[in-house]
Image (tube, rainbow, N blue to C red):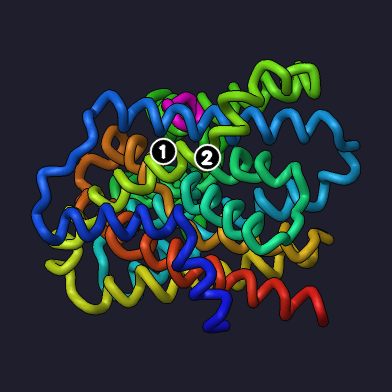
Amino acid sequence: MLEIVLQNLISPVILFFVLGLFACFVKSDLKFPTGLSEFLSIYLLIAIGLKGGIELSEHNLITLIKPLIGALFLGVLIPVIMFFICRWVGLDVKNSIGLAATYGSVSIVTYGAAISFLSHSNVSFESYMNAMVVIMESPAILVSLLMLKSIEAKQSTPGIRQGSLGITAGRPLLVRWIEPEVVRESLFGKSVLLLVGSLLVGFVVGQEAIPVVKPLFIDLYNSFLILFLLNMGLVAGQRLSDVRRHGIGLLALAVLMPITFGMLGVVIGSLAGLSQGGVTLMGVLAASSSYIAAPAALRTSVPDANPSIYLGLSLGITFPFNLTLGIPLYYIMAEWIVKL
């Protein structure tokens, strides 16, 4: 375990993230131009989507059924679990929804770091796993907002026939309570649009796209990831001050829940028949939390949720934990369960 953790910690990807954290702590004047940060985000989204689509075009749909079902299952289940745990520890409804959406969705950069870790460890994985990133990006956001609308409807319209989450008879809940703006943010926000769009482009063009996309989106991927993580180190360091204001309970939640969800993802990946590398990546996706897609949707749909909670915990605690200790931990979990 210690050897695997150390191997991860001394990789260039992680060390540049730590460099960004250090720069923030010593109050360096190092900062990334807004335009460059935006470019790096767009680059990573397109690169992962393209690679996923190209690889997806090479596989039979029957091969993908179990992993796709597993990814969708995690995307729906995790936000529900997160919401009820947040309510159990005393967090209000709006902030519980914020954390449910954030932790149910995925971190594209954590996934990229996990791929770098597996490549460095010479561990192979299913090439279509990039597609699982796209599959898990949006469901958690929609499920979380659906829960919120259900609760609000239950509180505002007493006396109607309801289920445990306020589901009424008549029209489907999604049609009844989810506004077009919520659906638009969840399905057509920048990150989801780029991921899904790039995946479809890669899927339609297939292997013929490789000569065009390889020089920029494949060969230079790890180099751009290093730049992005240097910037993420700066951003995460700035968020740590926000996180400290919310107490030890939420800080513990930001570490314990990724471990729990990572274990769940490893189990689902194993049941889906993935290899050790694929199981590791499924665990990483389940354990990761969004700081791009989900916060963008929450800003519009749940403005009362406190960004310093859902973004501070995700980016200030869970992201560094997953990047340094979580990825090796999920790899060991995968190694153990695959051998059973």
Closer-to-camera residue (176/241): 241
Indicate left or right for 304 with 71 as reference.
left
Q: Is residue 93 visible?
A: no
The x, y position of residue 125, in whole percent, is 75, 54
Closer-to-camera residue (190/230): 230
Closer-to-camera residue (300/34): 34
**Is residue 90 within the magenta segment?**
no
**Is residue 191 within the magenta segment?**
yes
User: Disc 2 or disc 1, which is closer to the eye?
Assistant: 1
Closer-to-camera residue (69/226): 226
Residue at 60% x, 38% y is 134
Residue at 57% x, 60% y is 284
Q: Quadrant of residue 50?
A: top right
| Total numbered badges shown on the rendered structure | 2
SS at badge 1? helix
First in sequence: mark 2 or mark 1? Answer: 2
Q: Which residue is mark 1?
A: 293
Q: Which residues are magenta?
A: 187-193
Tags 2 and 1 touching, CB below 8 Å: yes
The amino acid type, in three-letter code, at marker 2 is Ser
Tell me: residue 104, above or below residue 301. below
Q: Which mark is residue 138?
A: 2
SS at badge 2? loop
The x, y position of residue 283, in whole percent, is 61, 63
The x, y position of residue 13, in whole percent, is 45, 53
Tell me: residue 198, above or below residue 96. above
Residue at 62% x, 32% y is 218
The x, y position of residue 200, in whole percent, is 68, 23
Q: Quadrant of residue 23?
A: bottom left
